[in-house]
Each structure stands twice: as C-alpha cells, then as structure tokens.
Image: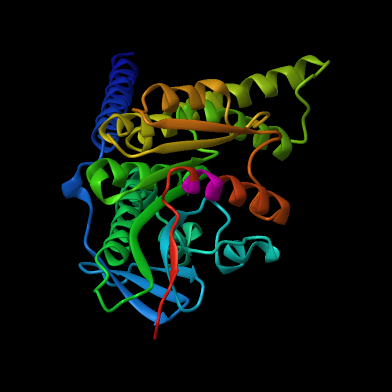
C-alpha cells in the first residue's frame, strides 16, 4: 500500500515538473523579438534575376530571392515574403504578375531548413526543442529580410536599378516578417502591406487541426451514433490542447505587438470577405493596433490562392494601385 502511494506521489511530482517545464519553455520562447535579435545575413547576386541570401554566423543557413524588373529603368522596389507556396513560378504568376517596377520575392529560409533536417529523423530531444527551433527559424527569416532591405536601400550611386522607395509586403503566414522588421526601423520602409494576414494563432490553428483529424479518421462533424460522437469529442479536446500550445509558442509572431511602433509608415491590409482561415477575431486586433495612416481593401472570396493566376492578377493590381496612391511608385529611363 505504501509502495503504491509512493509511486502515485512520484507520478504526480513528475507531471507537475513536466507541466512546469513546458510552461517555462513556452514563456521564454513567446517573448517578442527585439531589434538586437535580428542576425546578420549577406546578399550575393548569382544572376541579375536570382540572388542568394546567407547567414554570416551560420553559413549553412541560406535562401533565395528572385527579382523581376524592367530593363534600363530605375524604379521603386516591392519586397515580398510569401506564405506556404512560394518560388520563382509564384512571382511569374502564370503570366499574370505584371509590374513596371522592381519586384523581389524572398523565399523563407525554413524551406532549406526542412530539407536539411527531415522531421522523421528527429529524436525525442529534437521534438522537445521544437519551440526553440521555430523561433530560431523565424529569427533567421528576419535576418534574411533585413539583409535584403539594407541591400536595396543601401545601393551604391552607380547602381541605377533602385530608387530610394521600398515597400515591403507579407502574405498569409509570411505577413508578420515585414511588420516585425518594419517596427524596428520604420524610417527604412516607405510602405507596408499585409496580404491576407492574421493573428490569434490559436483561433486559426484549432479548426485546421480539427478538420485534419476528421479527415484522418474519416469522420463527419454531424455524427448520429454515440461512439462517433465520443471520437469527435476526443479529437476536439486534443486539437484544443495542441492549438493552445502552438498559439502560445508563436505569440512573438502576433503582429499587433509590433504594429504600434510603425509610426509614419502607410500600412495597407488586403483581406477576403469569406476567408475561412481568418475569422474577424484573427484580423481586427491588427487593424485596431495599427497607427495612421492605414487603409484596408476587402476582396470578394476566400483566402488568397497563389496558385491561381487570376488571384495573382487581382491582388497584384490592388497592391500596386495602393502604392501608386501613396506616391511610392516611380520609374525613369536610365541613360547608358
């Protein structure tokens, strides 16, 4: 009896220690980024239309930026950080992405990280360190974007490709990066665009996990028998728990923390009227915490689909029309 009681107390103590450890871990990783957290990266032009970005302190980390621009013209620059789907084909947009200025699309470094570190090869320690791994990848994405911004802004006088006007834009899960970086040095950024961006990650993640659970177990959300209802309740409880953990781990990426520091820089939001990924409570904190001048455009339909050329054309037109209205667009012929 005493032995059983001892084991029970030992189990309770272990659970308390585990919960305390997880709580402390989440508290430490959820702290907002500071300017001094941004690591140093450098830019190398491989070709006029493809650049390599690489970490100075950790050269294994690298990513790519693609640029499309008019020949023999000096123009303003739009730097874009994409979401899940990104790459050279995204910039071409199936022939629908048209712009008279410089457009640079930066691929998030996390893509190369996932190629180097396959999750199926992770051990228990790797999984325990997931919060730190995600934060570190976010930090290095900020470093890569900072290098790109400084490279364009600090172009030498003999480099006649760029004017002094730079607009940064982030789409979907890529939206926080320009906002975070812009809050550290708003004087470097002439305009910010948040394209189908969101906050309140717990609210966004939960339905995604829940729907994936239903699909995995081939269930519907309207069961009639008791056993199916029990399964769905279990899935809902698990997804509530994991979305709570993930949402709190990623709090450093919630844009409303950084938006109040972006003073004097025009901010524009583009959203879908029926976006299933971004409910009102995941967008309104962004609008409410943004300083003036700010504006928003609501597009009929759901979440932006970068694989749809028509979505690319429509969103691109809205982005450039806004930049033009803010007098951030400018191109002139360069005399050779």
Q: Is residue 84 above or below residue 232?
A: below
In this rendering, position of residue 223 left or right of residue 262: right
Outermost residue to the bottom: 336
Q: Residue at x 21, y 62 (%)?
A: 40
Q: Is residue 59 above or below residue 175?
A: below
Q: Residue at x 37, y 79 (%)?
A: 45
Q: Residue at x 52, y 31 (%)?
A: 296
Location of residue 218 (image quadrant):
top right
In this rendering, position of residue 84 left or right of residue 166: right
Residue 321 magenta-drawn?
Answer: yes
What is the image's colouring?
rainbow
Quarter of the figure with the N terminus: top left
Q: Nearer the viewer, residue 226 or 58?
A: 58
Residue 331 magenta-drawn?
Answer: no
Image location of residue 272, percent across then percent down = 63, 34
Image location of residue 256, percent across then percent down = 36, 29
Q: Main secondary structure of the magenta part?
A: helix
Image location of residue 325, percent across then percent down = 48, 43
Provide the residue span drawn in magenta: 319-324
Q: Nearer the viewer, residue 257 or 160?
A: 160
In this rendering, position of residue 277 left or right of residue 158: right
Quarter of the figure with the C terminus: bottom left
Q: Is residue 197 above or below residue 320?
A: above
Image location of residue 38, percent across then percent down = 23, 52
In this rendering, position of residue 167 left or right of residue 297: left
Answer whether residue 97 is visible to the viewer in this image.
yes
Answer whether residue 277 is visible to the viewer in this image.
no
């Amino acid at each position: 009896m005493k032995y059983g009681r001892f084991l029970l107390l030992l189990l309770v103590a272990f659970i308390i220690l585990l919960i305390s450890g997880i709580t402390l871990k989440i508290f430490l990783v959820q702290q907002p980024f500071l300017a001094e957290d941004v690591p140093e990266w450098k830019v190398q032009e491989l070709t006029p239309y493809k650049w390599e970005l690489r970490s100075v302190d950790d050269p294994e980390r690298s990513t790519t930026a693609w640029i499309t621009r008019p020949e023999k013209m000096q123009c303003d620059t739009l730097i874009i950080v994409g979401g899940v789907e990104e790459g050279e084909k995204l910039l071409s947009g199936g022939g629908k992405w048209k712009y008279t200025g410089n457009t640079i699309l930066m691929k998030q470094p996390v893509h190369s990280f996932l190629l180097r570190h396959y999750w199926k090869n992770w051990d228990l320690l790797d999984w325990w360190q997931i919060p730190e791994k995600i934060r570190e990848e976010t930090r290095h994405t900020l470093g890569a974007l900072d290098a790109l911004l400084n490279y364009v802004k600090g172009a030498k006088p003999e480099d006649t490709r760029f004017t002094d006007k730079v607009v940064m834009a982030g789409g979907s899960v890529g939206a926080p990066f320009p906002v975070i970086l812009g809050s550290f040095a708003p004087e470097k950024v002439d305009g910010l665009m948040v394209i189908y961006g969101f906050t309140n990650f717990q609210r966004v993640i939960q339905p995604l996990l829940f729907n994936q659970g239903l699909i995995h177990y081939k269930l519907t959300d309207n069961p009639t028998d008791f056993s199916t209802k029990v399964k769905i309740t279990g899935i809902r409880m698990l997804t509530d728990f994991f979305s709570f953990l993930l949402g709190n781990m990623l709090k450093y990426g919630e844009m409303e923390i950084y938006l109040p520091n972006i003073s004097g820089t025009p901010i524009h939001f583009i959203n879908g009227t029926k976006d299933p990924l971004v409910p009102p409570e995941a967008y309104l904190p962004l609008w409410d915490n943004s300083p003036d001048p700010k504006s928003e455009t609501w597009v009929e339909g759901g979440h932006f689909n970068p694989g749809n050329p028509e979505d690319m054309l429509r969103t691109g037109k809205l982005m450039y029309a806004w930049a033009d209205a803010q007098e951030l667009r400018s191109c002139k012929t360069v005399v050779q």
